[in-house]
Amino acid sequence: MLDTLQFMIDNSMINLDDVRMSMEKSKRNAILKKHPYDIWVASDGRSKTYIEDETKVKKRRLVAKSSREKLEDYIVKEYIKSHPIHKVDHSVEAIFKEWIEYALKEKDIEKNTGDRYQNDFDRFIKGKEFARTDIENVSNNDVIRFLKDTLNENSITRKTFSNLKTVLNGIFSYAMSEKNLNCISMSYTLKDYKVPDKKFKKNIVRDEEQVYGEKEILIIADYIIKNYQSTRELGILLALLTGLRAGELCSLKTSDQEKEMLYIQRTEIKYKNEDGKTIYSVREFPKSECSMNGIELSNSAMNVLSLIRKLNLKNGIGSEFLFYEPEYGRLKSYFFSKSLRKICQETGVKYRSMHKLRKTYASYLLANGVEEKIAQAQLRHKDSATTHKYYEFSIRNKEYKRDVLNKNDILRESQIK
């Protein structure tokens, strides 16, 4: 219904000036209806009535005007003066705060998502004139100008810009649907707003910074197999063999494996509480619906899971969580990051984050001829384009690359002397 109303406004099917005039007239009539005294025309032709006045003996005073309309204007004015209306703050910033509180209460978003929205708001909107503007007075041009100024004043990536638009859309959608405020439709405003690619910051990252190389994979795996002391190290090996996200890894339960299948049922989330302390908790559904289908486990991955269970049994761990230590409870994602960093230091391998193990797994599958649909299913991406665009990097070592290139050289070395 709100979308239909916005469409009618945008296409001049409804005149906002007429709507506002109608609302003002309705408010005026409501005040006059509350007026407790009659209005009459005196012998001198003037319109008269009484107005409440606490300073008078009879708590009222006589008022006369040259016409009924002017007298009614006076009545309305005096009523407003004696009944001050505390204006509700409908600024963009105020609505943002209400929206976040509402979305968290209704569980439309998680606390960590709310924190991210708050960070984006504080970075790009807070303190600007746009933030102080009444949301009903914000025009399409105001939004476009704000976005253009933001791009000119900040060096940001396209993804960051997309996150900012998500925040704006959330603010204005909430104002329309929950507050019934007469504001613009942000989705309509942004629909045709295109930004040239050159406006965005480009992060140039080499493949070797995104993934572990083939030799590095074997070094890490060999070290863990020979030296593991706890499930932490085995968890890193499992991530390398399955492409699990760190938040999925640390929230696995023993019941999630069914023979050669592993079902991803949940993930870890983190957020700041009111005291600013980082809280880690388990959300009882995964990052994407695709994860519910589960992933195929290789023989090596099943062997690692078997080792983890045996180690837990040996250490008397009876928790439903696969990665659990009596001193710390369920192991949080940062335990694995610390262990991976330590392993890299011990082996002399350059450290990359836990997420880089996921990218390494994807790149390894694709580099070795695994069908893209299988790789996509293992990574639980909605489409293969995501797999190729964000997860496919070269993992081949330099010697392999040179050997391949020399075998397929256009000119033979003997031809150039």
Image (cartoon, helix red, strand yellow):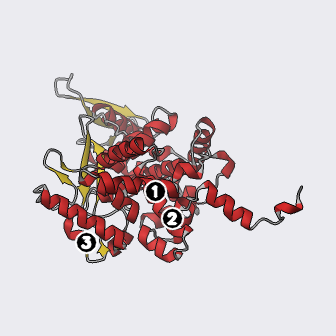
Query: Visible in this render: residue 67?
Result: no
Q: Decide which of 80, 311 is in the foreground and name it.
A: 311
Marks 1 and 2 in Cβ contact (< 8 Å): yes
Mark 2 residue element = helix
- Residue matched to label 3: 257
Three-letter code, disc 2 = Tyr
Horizontal side, residue 73 vs residue 262: left or right: right
The percent coordinates of residue 407 (x first, y second) are 73, 67
Cα separation, mark 1 vs mark 3, equals: 25 Å
Q: Decide which of 142, 255 is in the foreground and name it.
A: 255
Horizontal side, residue 192 vs residue 372: left or right: right
Q: Decide which of 130, 116 is in the foreground and name it.
A: 116
Q: Quadrant of the N terminus?
A: bottom left
Marks 1 and 2, the one that precedes in the sequence: 1
| Residue 148, quarter of the rendered image | top right
When the figure is inspected, residue 331 is found, relative to residue 367, above or below; the finding is above
Mark 3 residue element = strand
Three-letter code, disc 1 = Ile
- Residue matched to label 1: 217
Query: Visible in this render: residue 275?
Result: yes
Mark 1 neighbour density, 10 Å: few (under 14) some (14–19) many (20 or more): some
Q: Residue at x 45, y 49 (%)?
A: 167
